[in-house]
Amino acid sequence: MATSVEKEIEKLRAEIRYHEHRYYVLDDPEISDYEFDQLMRKLQDLEREHPELVTPDSPTQRVGGKPAEQFSKVRHQVPMMSLDNTYSVEELRDFDRRVRELSGRSRVEYVAELKLDGLSMSLIYEKGVLARGVTRGNGVEGEDVTANVKTIGSVPLRIDGRKLQVIGHPERFEVRGEVIMPLKMFERLNAQREAAGEPKFANPRNAAAGTIRQLDPKMVAQRKLDMFHYYLLVGGDVPLKEHWKTLEALAEMGFKVNPHRRLCASFDELLEFVQEWETKRNELEYETDGVVVKVNDTRLWEELGNTAKSPRWAIAYKYPAHQATTVVKDIRAQVGRTGTLTPVADLNPVNVGGVTVSHATLHNMDEIARLGLRIGDTVLLQRAGEVIPQVVKVVKRAPDGREFHMPKRCPVCGGDVFRAEGEVAYRCVNAACPARLKESLLHFAARHAMGIDGLGEALVDQLVDRGIVKDAADLYALTQDQLAALERMGKKSAANLISEIEKSKKVDLARVIFAVGIPFVGERTAQLLAEHFGSFDRLAEASEEELEQVHEIGPKTAQGIAEFFAEERNRKLIEKLRAAGVRMEQEKAAKKGPQPLAGKQFVLTGTLPHHSREEASQMIEEAGGRVVGSVSKKTDYVVVGAEPGSKLEKARALGVKTIDEDELLKLLK
Ligand code: IVH
């Protein structure tokens, strides 16, 4: 007999599943994000009180568990084939002819679907519950990435029993489809990577593939992947007689199926679909590089059979990479959300595969140098898959071509432009630059920064575009009425946000330092700065030399910090935050004990007899010492336990003093 708690939990889960489906699959939510979060929180609370009732298919379990060490290999029940490709309508016609000849039919129905540019994925459901997600791998054997796949909102964790009726309630079935990264997420991810000095992903497909192979599901969850489903197998067979019916059944079961599909009664209808999407695909929020054509009658699939690698009942028609040449009229710097100045080419408008192009990104100064590009040159443009055209090369040099130089001042706000040594990107240092403002507000509100829950992208856009918020400090002047008047905000969500903002005034100094977005100052550096300087004022006054004296802070970071505080507007922002009541001082120094190890650097290696690594680190840090990961000349002591690693050898090679646990305990006294 189910207890009332069990019933309540089940009811909540069903409700959440319903809303997940509305939001992630149908793209048509019925309730606000806030209301959804409330449901989720309620379920989390109940599950925390009754951990014995947590099941792996609970909506709370989308992001769970520890990072994986590695992925295990799984053999596919039915190999995952790839598709034959063609770029020509003639070959598409040949395909139709071949299908008709082989099947002995004069006319064949086709299903046209978009070819989604991501990576294929196999989902195994057992008793209606998602049991496993496996990558395509080499087609025969893939990798088990279940924990990562569960973070994808459009992948159902369980299918309602009633909905399995269409396919006869099998114990086990398999659904295949394509995991993609929406363009918006892709751009955001690359902007973040650029800001962090990490290499950018070349296209959304690589970004999606890289993400699904992340070992930490929490990272995957942040990247907001999506999945479209197009294939169903029961007992290794295709259960329905028509592929079109399979797509409908999948949608009925709660899977996200791409809406842009057509059942074509003739080759001409197929061609129409292909031509229609050649330009329409540019308006989608994700990338497609062609159309997949499949024979609708699945009984014909077996008859037609496969070649070594691909089925004879399907073909991928790929849109050609579009190219055109035009003149670069000018090059200017565009300020992105992270303050990075990106050189953009203004072009003589030109038609590239049905789209008029008048700008192209040049990425950075290195790229301009690589192309040898000057203003006035004629260039070859290409738009393949991606929306933004690339400059492939200079085809004709202008005799009077002008070189482009990065401006010394930000073209949007006039703030100083700064390029750190060893970095490719130039940045505007002004935190109040409108182009930067949106991203900096999102960063400011983020969980590990001020932790203002509910301040999302849609809201930030409205606040900035309407001129309500001009810097992060303005958030503290927002009123409930102001917020309630915005789109997609109710009274309740407004009140909630106000209380979140109020609450954020009390976060630790380290989080405030992290939140204001000083170049190169991540969470850990912010913590070190807060501990070292104890207040925003002292940090702001520190010279580069003083900053470099803080352990772990190098010249690049020190310069970034100094330049940040040299900017008048940034100083004003700090003043406004202070006036708003945000904490600007370290909370009274935690009652510190004696600091016998002040200034000493330690490295731990091997297993200590009486203390775990964490305990040892904590003791050292409480005594004023620091524990770092690798041995260098700066290391004062290497603490050696049983079965030490290569760190011991390195210590010996560098002549660093080695001690055991006993000796460490003596030092601590
Ligand atoms: S059907 C046996 N449908 O394209 C055929 N594939 O080049 C199974 N793809 O590996 C694939 N969109 O990753 C199919 N609507 C679609 C697709 C699609 C993208 C990918 C898939 C496949 C690759 C083949």
Image (cartoon, rainbow, N blue to C red):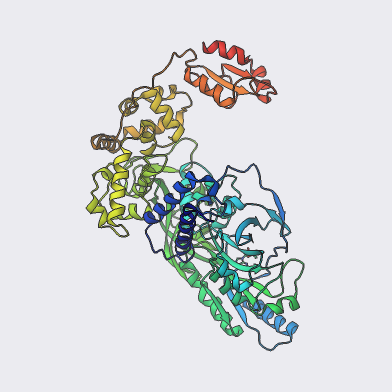
- Residue 258 lies, with reference to residue 457, above or below; the image says below
The reply, left or right, for residue 7 in relation to residue 571 is right
- Residue 473 lies, with reference to residue 526, above or below; the image says below
- Could you tell me which quadrant the N terminus lies in? bottom right
Does the image show residue 588?
Answer: yes
Q: Residue furthest front?
A: 1
Residue pictured at 56% horizontal, 16% vertical:
636
* Ligand 1 position by quadrant: bottom right
Q: Residue furthest bottom?
A: 106
Q: Residue 264's x, y, as percent?
A: 58, 82
Taking depth in this image into account, of 188 and 216 the one nearest to the observer is 216
Q: Residue 38's x, y, as percent?
A: 39, 52
Taking depth in this image into account, of 101 and 225 the one nearest to the observer is 225
Task: State the image quarter where residue 306 is shown.
Answer: bottom right
Does the image show residue 402?
Answer: no
Q: Residue furthest right?
A: 308
- Residue 253 lies, with reference to residue 580, above or below; the image says below
- Residue 312 lies, with reference to residue 370, above or below; the image says below
The reply, left or right, for residue 162 in relation to residue 564 is right
Residue pictured at 54% horizontal, 68% vertical:
257
Q: Residue 521's x, y, as percent?
A: 43, 35
Residue pictured at 70% horizontal, 79% vertical:
299
Q: Residue 463's x, y, as percent?
A: 29, 52
Q: Number of callouts in the render? A: 0
